[in-house]
Image (cartoon, rainbow, N blue to C red):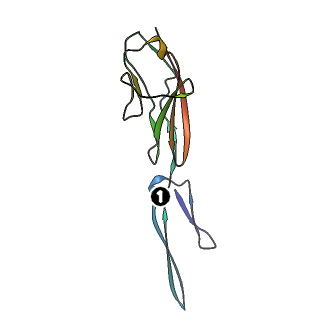
Amino acid sequence: GGFTVLPNGGLQISKARVEDSGTYMCVAQNPAGTALGKTKLRVQVPPVITSDIKAYTVALDASVTLQCQSEGFPTPSITWHKNGQPLSESVRQRVLSTGALQIAFAQPGDTGRYTCTAANVAGTTSLEMSITVQ
């Protein structure tokens, strides 16, 4: 980001980025002596879901992977809901390390609205998509 020293001695960072995180030291001096101040800055970035596929069509007994690629700092955690209810993992449904939801041997009951939610301390965002099993 851009750094500006304010008239009161403060440091202003405009458009702070993760790279601006770190320890900052302030030094004040006059004829009577020197004073030091240190502070730590951690820049956090709210999640953004970069996947954009909103509708999946899958053949009966085939497998499908719903993408939920996200960015943010700290790394967002991913949760999935189906028709508004938390999705429980099973032998056929599992969340991959990428955050994607993999459904094996798709059944008619898998048809519905799926929502992936990416969350971290800086915020939360969701993406809704649908599956149609044919």
Is 79 displayed left or right of 61 in the figure? right
Q: Nearer the viewer, residue 41 or 14?
A: 41
Residue drawn where x is 41% and y is 28% of the image: 89
Q: Residues within 10 Å of mark 1 (few under 14, many from 20)?
A: some
Q: Position of residue 128 (x, y in %)?
A: 55, 26
Identify whether 46 is placed above or below 131: below
Q: Is residue 113 above or below residue 48?
A: above
126 on left or right of 90: right
Report the residue that reaches farthest toward the right.
7
Residue drawn 49% across the image and 23% down it: 53
* Residue position marked by numbered label 1 in the rendering: 20
> In x, y percent, where is residue 106?
41, 14
* Residue 5 on image: x %, y %: 57, 68
Identify the residue shown where x is 41% and y is 9%.
60
Which SS class for mark 1?
Answer: helix
Residue farthest bottom in this picture? 32
Residue 90 percent location from the top left of the image: 39, 25
Q: Residue at x 45, y 28 (%)?
A: 88
Q: Foreground: 66 or 51?
A: 66
Residue nearest the viewer, comparing 7 with 62: 62
Q: Is residue 76 above or below residue 44?
A: above
Under mark 1, the amino acid is Asp
Count the numbered circles shown.
1
| 65 w.r.t. 33: above or below | above
